[in-house]
Amino acid sequence: MKDKINALSEEIEQFKAENKDELESFRLKYLSKKGEINNLFAEFKNVPKEERKELGKLINDLKNKAQEKFDSMKASLEEAEETQSEYHDLTLPVNQEEIGARHPISIVRNEINDVFARIGFTISEGPEIENDWHNFTALNFPEEHPARDMQDTFFVEQNPDLALRTHTSSVQVRVMENNKPPIRIVAPGRVFRNEAISARAHCIFHQIEGLYVDKNVSFVDLKQTLYYFAREFFGEQTKIRFRPSYFPFTEPSAEMDVSCNICGGKGCNVCKYTGWLEIMGCGMVDPNVLDNCGIDSSEYSGFAFGMGIERIAMLKYQINDLRLYFENDVRFLKQFKSAL
Ligand code: PHE
């Protein structure tokens, strides 16, 4: 029996497991229930008493040796596997994380903010749920104005009225109530109107409004400021023109057009062959509005303007359907990655 133990001990020492299968065959051969070492324990029953002590120790040592050998082979196989998978195939491309892109509305909003920041305008924000005073009354909206109708405005509560703001002009009111002139702000933000969704309209959209109030502000200042904006945003060669218009809160009021940046004014389907693109409403702040907000209209005057960011972005990127902004289709959104 001693010879057998020695032979097994030798075998175990020499054994090399190159892979998991070989490791498993080692375990079956030596350590399993029907393995060689257990067989020795079975034979041990027939060993004469005098030899038992010595043989028992030898078999036990052999068992420990086999177990240790098994553990160390297992550990080194696992280690090899780990380093192997770490450097599995060095020619594979790197596992790249997708980097998100800014939404075109955010890109354009930031650009517009930047243009006005360069000439001293700061950014103001206000609540999206407004009361009647800030959204309508202070802005000179007559009692029977259609915007005050349920059909046009989303009311959250009535009597007293709370509604989703229909424009960011409400921010102008808040700023004038809380600050003394000179005031130079732009107010970007989400606005809400009860409109059917189509390629040209949506019930949620974004505006940027501007407000300038000081002594001796005239239409000349309005024109020059907006001319600066048009050239910075659409390019040096851009021309502007004003058409008379109406807003309750400005007097006189105008719509401003810029020369079409696609055809350079010659006429194309973007400008509908007029050479001009309408981009914003503007005007001199109505003296009633100044007085409503606690600013003395005999001392101060101001101008205001407002534009839809969706429309400006449509012109900039030649996007022809407003719904694309809200659909979250990555094929659309990832095109703006370079503009991060
Ligand atoms: N508030 C106007 C609108 O929503 C835009 C505007 C702002 C016009 C400021 C003139 C002056 O259409």
Image (tube, helix red, strand yellow):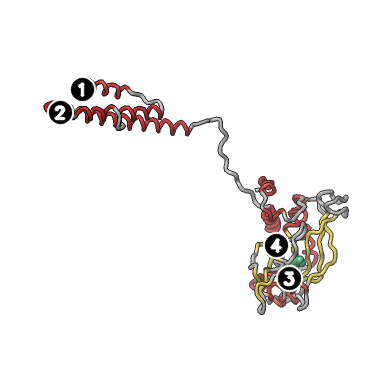
Q: Which residue is mark 2?
A: 52
Q: Is residue 263 left or right of residue 48?
A: right
Nearer the viewer's eye, disc 3 or disc 1? 1
For the residues labelled 4 and 1, the Cα–Cα distance comes to 91 Å
Nearer the viewer's eye, disc 2 or disc 4? 2
Residue 58, horizontal then vertical, whole percent: 20, 27
Q: Earlier in the sequence, mark 1 or mark 2?
A: 1
Nearer the viewer's eye, disc 3 or disc 2? 2
Nearer the viewer's eye, disc 4 or disc 3? 4
Q: Earlier in the sequence, mark 4 or mark 1?
A: 1
| Element under disc 2 | helix
Q: Which residue is mark 3?
A: 215
Q: Residue at x 40, y 25 (%)?
A: 18
Residues under numbered marks 3 and 1 in contact, where contact means CB atoms less than 8 Å apart:
no
For disc 1, the neighbor class at 10 Å (few under 14, some 14 to 19, many from 20) is few
For the residues labelled 3 and 2, the Cα–Cα distance comes to 115 Å
Residue 180 seen: no
| Element under disc 1 | loop
Q: Earlier in the sequence, mark 3 or mark 2?
A: 2
For the residues labelled 4 and 3, the Cα–Cα distance comes to 36 Å
Against 77, residue 100 (above or below) is below
Against 287, residue 224 (above or below) is above
Q: Amino acid at mark 3?
A: Lys
| Disc 1: residue Cβ within 8 A of ligand 1's nearest atom | no
For the residues labelled 2 and 4, the Cα–Cα distance comes to 92 Å
Q: Earlier in the sequence, mark 4 or mark 3?
A: 4
Residues under numbered marks 2 and 4 in contact, where contact means CB atoms less than 8 Å apart:
no
| Element under disc 4 | strand
Q: Quadrant of residue 137?
A: bottom right
Q: Residue at x 40, y 28 (%)?
A: 21
Q: Amino acid at mark 4?
A: Ile
Residue 1: assigned label: 1
